[in-house]
Image: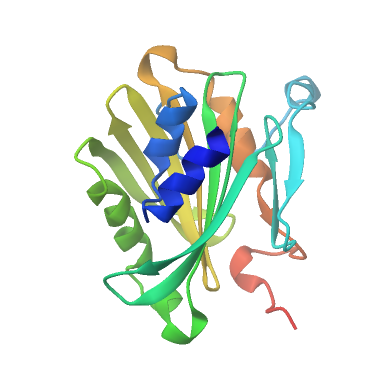
C-alpha cells in the first residue's frame, strides 16, 4: 500500500516530505543542526541493526533503520518546462519516525544546478505545496564540506527536520519526520546523516570527479 500511495503521489506531480511521512503514521522532532561524529563503541552498537543501503546507480550509500521503500518517477516542471527525475527512499525507525532520502536530478544542459538560489527555491516549493507547512527555522550550513540548507518545518502534529544540498546536477534531501508528542532521541537522526556518503569519494562531495 505504501508503494501504491507513493505512485499516486508521483503521478499527481506532488513530491513533498510531509505527505509521505504523514501517511506512514510517523512524525518528526526538532533536532540539532550539526551531525556530530559517533564517539563510543557502546553508542555505535545501538545502530548495528541499521541496514546499509546503496543506490541502484551506486551514486551514494546510507543507513536506514530497516530496508527502505523506493519509488522513482520523472515529472515535468510546469513552470520551467524541463523534466526532473525523483528517487525517494523511506523507512520507519524504532523511534516512531520516518527517515527519508530524496534524490532529485535536474537536466544538466539547463544549468539548473548552477543557480545559487536552487536550495532556497527548492525549500520554497516544499512550503508552497500546502498551507499546513510552516517554516520554523532555516540556516545555511556545511554538510560534509558542501554548502547546504538546514530547515525545520511544522505540519500539524508533525515536525520535519532536514538538510538539502546539491552534488553536480542532483539535489539531495535527507529528513526525519516525527510527531511532536512522540519525540525521539536526536542521535538517530544524526546517525542517519553521518551514514550518508557519495561513493568513490574520499574528500568532500564537491570534490567528486565526474563519471566517465
Q: Is residue 35 above or below residue 109?
A: above
x then y, percent, for residue 18: 38, 37
Residue at 74% from the left image edge and 26% from the top image edge: 47
* Quadrant occupied by the N terminus: top right
Residue at 31% from the left image edge and 59% from the top image edge: 120
Q: Nearer the viewer, residue 170 or 30?
A: 170
Residue 171 visible somewhere in the drawing? yes
Residue at 52% from the left image edge and 73% from the top image edge: 169
Residue ranking furthest to the bottom: 109
Q: Is residue 28 left or right of residue 71?
A: left
Residue ranking furthest to the left: 131
x then y, percent, for residue 5: 48, 39
x then y, percent, for residue 14: 36, 51
Q: Can you tell which quarter of the image residue 20 is in?
A: top left
Q: Nearer the viewer, residue 148 or 10?
A: 10
Q: Nearer the viewer, residue 197 or 178?
A: 178
Q: Nearer the viewer, residue 36 or 51?
A: 51
Residue 32 visible somewhere in the drawing? no
Q: Can you tell which quarter of the image residue 148 is in?
A: bottom left
* Quadrant occupied by the C terminus: bottom right
Q: Is residue 142 above or below residue 211?
A: above
Residue at 33% from the left image edge and 53% from the top image edge: 123
Q: Is residue 21 left or right of residue 127?
A: right
x then y, percent, for residue 32: 46, 33
Amino acid at each position: 500500500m505504501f508503494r501504491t500511495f507513493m505512485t499516486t503521489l508521483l503521478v499527481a506531480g506532488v513530491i513533498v516530505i510531509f505527505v509521505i511521512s504523514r501517511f506512514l503514521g510517523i512524525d518528526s522532532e526538532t533536532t540539532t543542526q550539526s551531525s556530530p561524529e559517533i564517539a563510543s563503541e557502546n553508542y555505535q552498537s545501538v545502530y548495528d541493526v541499521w541496514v546499509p543501503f546503496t543506490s541502484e546507480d551506486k551514486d551514494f550509500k546510507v543507513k536506514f533503520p530497516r530496508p527502505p521503500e523506493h519509488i522513482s518517477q520523472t515529472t515535468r516542471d510546469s513552470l520551467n518546462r524541463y523534466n526532473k527525475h525523483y528517487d525517494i527512499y523511506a523507512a520507519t525507525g524504532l523511534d516512531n519516525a520516518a527517515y527519508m532520502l530524496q534524490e532529485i536530478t535536474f537536466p544538466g544542459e539547463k544549468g539548473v544546478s548552477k543557480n545559487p538560489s536552487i536550495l532556497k527555491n527548492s525549500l520554497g516549493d516544499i512550503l508552497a505545496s500546502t498551507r499546513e507547512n510552516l517554516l520554523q527555522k532555516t540556516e545555511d550550513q556545511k554538510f560534509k564540506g558542501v554548502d547546504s540548507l538546514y530547515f525545520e518545518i511544522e505540519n500539524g502534529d508533525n515536525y520535519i527536520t532536514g538538510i538539502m544540498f546539491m552534488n553536480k546536477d542532483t539535489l539531495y534531501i535527507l529528513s526525519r519526520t516525527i510527531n511532536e508528542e512522540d519525540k525521539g532521541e536526536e542521535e538517530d537522526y544524526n546517525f542517519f546523516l553521518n551514514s550518508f556518503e557519495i561513493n568513490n569519494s574520499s574528500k568532500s562531495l564537491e570534490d567528486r570527479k565526474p563519471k566517465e
